[in-house]
Image: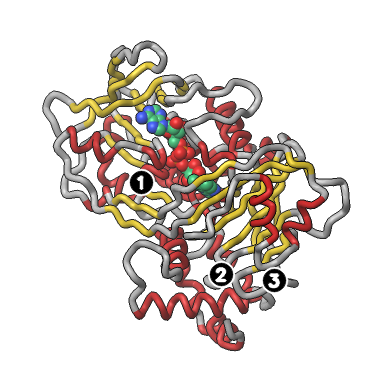
Amino acid sequence: MTTDAAGHAVVVGAGVSGLLAAEVLARRFERVTVVERDALPEGEPRFRAGVPQSRHVHILWSRGVAALESLLPGVVAALEAAGAVVVHTPEQMRWLSPADWFAGVTGTHFLSASRELLEATLRRRLAARSAITLMDRHEVAGLVPTSGGGAVGGVRLRERGKDGRESALDAELVVVAAGRSARITDWLAALDYPAPVTDRFDAHLGYSSRYFRPSAVRRDWTAMYVQGNPDVPRGGVIVPIDGGRWVVTLIGQGEHQPPIEEKEWLAFAASLRSGELAEALADAEPLSDAVAYRATANEWAHFERLRRWPRGLLVVGDALCRFNPVYGHGMTVAALQAQVIAERTAASEPAAVAAQARQLQKAVAKCPRAAWAIATGEDSRYPSTDGPAPGRLVRMQQDYMARVLAAANTDPVVAEGFFAVLSLNRRPETLLTPQIAARARRRRA
Ligand SMILES: Cc1cc2nc3c(=O)[nH]c(=O)nc-3n(C[C@H](O)[C@H](O)[C@H](O)COP(=O)(O)OP(=O)(O)OC[C@H]3O[C@@H](n4cnc5c(N)ncnc54)[C@H](O)[C@@H]3O)c2cc1C
């Protein structure tokens, strides 16, 4: 299948970053085709194999909630009407930080929903746009160069389930939003582009998650998070999601991988730094077996540093930069990138958008900075983490952050600053003010 490339953009992947990119491109391009290798569920939200992470806790921090709402006004209300829950944290959350329980402080909020509901809601909004086509059951197998070279002119498609029949889809702009499994480096190599420098920190963190139906008993919390620390690198989180369910994720590092067998899973839950999480599960009804997820390394492919970059190509979302998910930043960064694309292309014709691909790539590559600093700064605290060892400066920052976090447990001023950073509303440097430093110094981590 070939189409007229003029005014046409192709987005590879119908995950959160692909759907949000499609939404903003539809404001500039006559047609946007989102190519997805999975069969996309119609109607009710359903699991699909292409996003295995959807079975684990997926929260959207307040900055991501605001970005999502600015891109698709009304979407947050639609999510809440479908069962998503806004949780004010730490006020409505029992949260044991590496230092102590949070108590008596105000922080921020996050939206908690099943990832399936989030995607289904976004797809419904996109379906209402005549410019957007969701082409599922098609896998992108590579990029098509333009005849003169130096530009991407479309993608090679493989139809799933039809003996792998191949075709091409022409486009002025190709946005790769294919997630952690994206083959973009191979696709670029086939067009004679070098591999980007890729930074990597792997804390060897594992997840194991199950759904529960909470009992009707009254609780003074809506969600719970028992964090690990370097002495006990095991944690667990309970969040409410649509369908009146809880998703419960157990988290462990290195040799402390959380199991999936029922008895061991419950024993792991009981072995956390607090017994409260296991107690909360005691009268909850299990709705599923546990499933594990292990590929949680922080990886950032620096496409923006390549000397040459083809016109008409953009890489976003997890295909560009993926984080240890425990900090919950991936979807917020995806929404921020969509905002950047919208802002940068607001006055551009499709051909001009394709021509500014390199500048766009540089612009979206700034979005992961804060989340990357938080995730890698914390992960490199653990000796079992693979990655550059922290230098003196990073160790000083880690020590400082441990004090800030300890102070944030009870000090309202520090808590306000801490949660503004964690939710990506403010940059990490904003925690270096003399006021916060003085308050953090008073608390020993
Ligand atoms: C265990 C876990 C828990 C997480 N928890 C959180 C959280 O709490 N909060 C948060 O903000 N983020 C979280 N994340 C991160 C979040 O899932 C991602 O950052 C977010 O989904 C954006 O990813 P994406 O859209 O770029 O990729 P994905 O969501 O992975 O989507 C990629 C899509 O591309 C499709 N695809 C891949 N290759 C091809 C191809 N060749 N052709 C066609 N289609 C293709 C896939 O089928 C898939 O649909 C978590 C991640 C993991 C792994």
Cβ at disc 1 under 8 Å from ligand 1: yes
Q: Is residue 166 above or below residue 215?
A: above
Disc nearer the start of the sequence (1/3): 3
Circle 1 residue: 320
Circle 3 residue: 101
**Residue 359 image offset from top left, x and y in percent:** 27, 47
Of circles 1 and 3, the one toward us is: 3
Of circles 2 and 3, the one toward us is: 2
**Residue at horizontal 69%, vertical 41%?**
211
The answer to whether residue 145 is visible is: yes
**Residue 107 image offset from top left, x and y in percent:** 66, 65
Q: Secondary structure at mark 3?
A: loop
Q: Residues within 10 Å of mark 1 (few under 14, many from 20)?
A: many
Occupied quadrant, residue 267? bottom right
- Residue furthest left as drawn: 148
> What's the amino acid at mark 1?
Leu
The answer to whether residue 28 is visible is: no
**Residue at horizontal 64%, vertical 37%?**
74
Circle 2 residue: 229
Q: Is residue 238 above or below residue 427?
A: above
